[in-house]
Amino acid sequence: MKLFKRAPFCQVFFSRVPLNTYLAKLVFGLFLSASGISFAQQAAPAAPSAPTTDDEMSKAILEKLQKSGDIVIRPSDLPPKPPPKAAAPNPVVRTAPKPVEHAHWSYTEGPDGPANWGKTSKENLLCSIGKQQSPMNIEGGILVDLPPLRFDYKLSPLTIQDNGHTILVNYAEGSNLSLDARQYRLVQFHFHKPSEEAIDGKRADMVAHLVHQHHDGRLLVVAVLMNSSQEASQAENAAFQMILNHIPLVKKESSSPNGVMIDLNQLLPKNLAYFTFMGSLTTPPCSENVQWVVLKEAAVISKQQLDNFSRIYPNNARPLQSRSGRLIKEAR
Ligand SMILES: [Zn+2]
């Protein structure tokens, strides 16, 4: 496994392993000391019994992170480095660590709006100066034969969160996408309204971003466009409805309703022809080198489902970014 200083993903810090503040402090201390070295190199064998000391606890955490294989952490998501232990025998007055200050950003115009994301923090600089930023308008691609997408999605217990920017579902291990002899694990998915990507200048009602990660850390996001239909009885999408049903009442609290399983296959359209190109995360820190796969056929949802989502997030789409000469491939 590899940890990144800069995190993927549109929706950012995702972890299926809950880290309480105490554990996070320990991880962060090690993260800083590793300074570019992967945790795998530093990890020690598991302690045979329940950890009791700081050292044992940190070893146990490292092992857990390694096993998860998908955890991506950026420094700003972690608490500040704890003060070093006092070596001097004299009593030291310690100031409490400052609380983590997340760079606030939003989708509305203003100092923290999309035009200024790059100024909200040093680590978000790519949002301003990046050369392969997403989303972009998809047009003028070359028509070629593309390798098929092979989805192998299993049922997953539903773990859902309203993170203040979108509704996000973390997916259990074991669901994968294979493309061109590379396997990517489905990590999480979330939604934007309207769709961030446009095709020939036109945005869809919504989009689901299915975030995958290869074991080398590379990200691949599948965009499933979603369009609404008035014929509610036929158009209602079962997977999307389950998500709407279980959106937590409290923001930023992750919820795992007992016994509720989600099947993301229900959101995929029949035709899996796609566009592909390189891009970035569409939210800060706007990290690049993300492969995008945008399905040409949209999923169908009902008008009521669209209206429901809209009441929570009427507009959580980043404006279109410059293409900067990027190649787009389109399945012919
Ligand atoms: Zn997204």
Image (cartoon, helix red, strand yellow):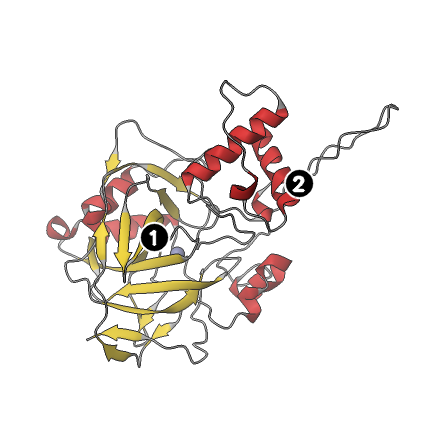
Judged from the image, the quadrant occupied by ligand 1 is bottom left
Residue 105, image x, y percentages: 54, 55
Q: Against 243, is 112 above or below?
A: below
Callout 2 secondary element: loop
Q: Is residue 166 left or right of residue 151?
A: right
Task: Give the structural element (helix, strand or loop) at label 1.
Answer: helix
- Which residue is found at the position 50% from the left and 52% from the top? 7
Name the residue type under label 1.
Ser
> Can residue 67 be seen from the camera position used here?
yes
Q: How many marks?
A: 2
Question: Residue 320, how many percent across, how many down?
Answer: 42, 70
Q: Which mark is residue 310?
A: 1
Q: Earlier in the sequence, mark 1 or mark 2?
A: 2
Direction from residue 240 to residue 218 in the image, left or right: right
Eyeballing the image, is 48 above or below 39? above
What residue would you read off at disc 2?
A: 80
Instruction: Give the residue at x 31% y 81%.
Output: 140
Three-letter amino acid code of the residue under disc 2: Pro
Give percent across and percent down for residue 87.
82, 29
